[in-house]
Amino acid sequence: PTLRGIPTRFVERVTSLLPTRLPLEITGQLIDDEGYWQRCATRRWENCQIVDHGTSWKRLYFERNLQEFLESFDPAAQTNEELLKLLALSKDYVFSLRIQQFLSHLDLEMVFQNVPTLSNLELSYGVLSIGMDYDRSLFGMKIADVASLAKALRVTETLSIMSLPSNQLDDNGVRILASGMSGNSTITCLDLSHNKVADRGVKALAKLLSPTSVLVSLNLADNHVHADGGKYLGRALKVNSSLQSLNMRLNRLGDEGGHFLIEGCRQNATLAQLNLSCNACEAEVAQALYAMLPKNASLTSLDLSGNALDEQAARLVRAALESNSTLRHVDMRLNHAEPETVAAIDELAKRNELAHVRALRRALDGGRADTSRVGTAASAAVGGS
């Protein structure tokens, strides 16, 4: 079958008459009409968020279809030939995959090789509907899974966002993963939140933050990072020129680890967002901020909520913020400071935010004025001729 020869204005009418259960072998290459793929998607799934799929209904259908196949794939009942066939059909339309269970523990290198357009991968080795049959061994990545992924990362040319939350990844697993990322130049966002990463794992990750790193965002929230991990990250930040967001929420940095990390920010010119909430930070962290903030011009958001900062520490933060013009959001909730001091810190951050907005408006108005002058000059030239 083919739609060639049919005037463009009639294609939508023709596809609207087609059933939604036609084989993908036919419809995948034949039909690009978004209306048809919208019907296919909404009749199969109740909740379809097209914004998560590049605002394309065809892409949404292929990505959700492959996601469900991988989540339910059973090597005992299905063959690799079936998987390879679907991967071949989907390779031109799958850019993002969000897999919440992967009981088959398939070789990820095979997936990467057959989906060359994959740029965003979120992968959790969980179980969607376990009921009363709980088995701990069903959860988390095995060493073989990490090794398979690390091997695939060495050859991928498109993956830019990788999220591996809630996979029980420990230091050994992260060190293997980091070895695969060491030669990778495409991944800019890495999410390892809700795992078991401790200091040795962070040491391996810190090596990725070299002067040639392309990593823009690193999420290590809810792990087991202690003071040594903060020391490794602080050293890395001194030479790194790519990282813009670092999330260390719900770790165990303590005062010492937080101090080392913030010291690293003194020589860093790119980090814009730093989350240190719930890390038992106290006076040393406040003193490090007092020394760092007046000299830092890149940090715009700082989360210090849920720590143990007392009134004296909060006053140090306030004093530091008085000499800083770029930090526009500071979260000091759930500390031990007086409400008045917290409110004063918030006001200083709002002052910086307002100044930032005004600067943007001036730049925008200046651009408009330049455009207007160019237009006036051009009109005058045309009139003169």
Image (cartoon, rainbow, N blue to C red):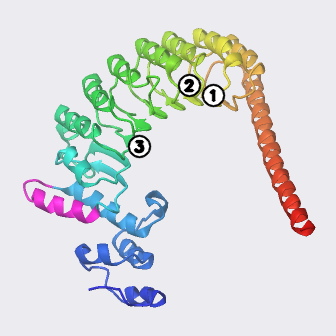
When the figure is inspected, residue 71 is found, relative to residue 105, above or below; the finding is below
Q: SS at mark 3? A: strand
In this figure, which residue is indicated by the disc labeled 1?
A: 333
Q: Nearer the viewer, mark 1 or mark 3?
A: 3
In this figure, which residue is indicated by the disc labeled 2?
A: 306
Residue 351 locus on image (x, y percent): 79, 32
Q: CA distance from mark 1 to mark 3?
A: 31 Å
Q: Is residue 130 visible?
A: no
Q: Does the magenta portion include 83?
A: yes
Farthest residue, direction left: 76
Q: Are marks 3 and 2 in contact (CB under 8 Å)?
A: no
Q: Are marks 1 and 3 in contact (CB under 8 Å)?
A: no
Q: CA distance from mark 3 to mark 2?
A: 29 Å
In this figure, which residue is indicated by the disc labeled 3?
A: 161
Q: SS at mark 2? A: loop
Mark earlier in primary sequence (2, 1): 2
Magenta region: 74-90
Q: Residue at x 78, y 48 (%)?
A: 364
Q: Residue at x 27, y 44 (%)?
A: 126
Residue 341 locus on image (x, y percent): 75, 21
Type of amino acid under label 2: Gly
When the figure is inspected, residue 187 is found, relative to residue 59, above or below; the finding is above
Q: Does the magenta portion include 228?
A: no
Q: Nearer the viewer, mark 3 or mark 2?
A: 3
Mark earlier in primary sequence (3, 2): 3
The local crowd at label 3, few if under 14, some if 14 to 19, many if 20 or more residues have their Cα within 10 Å, is some
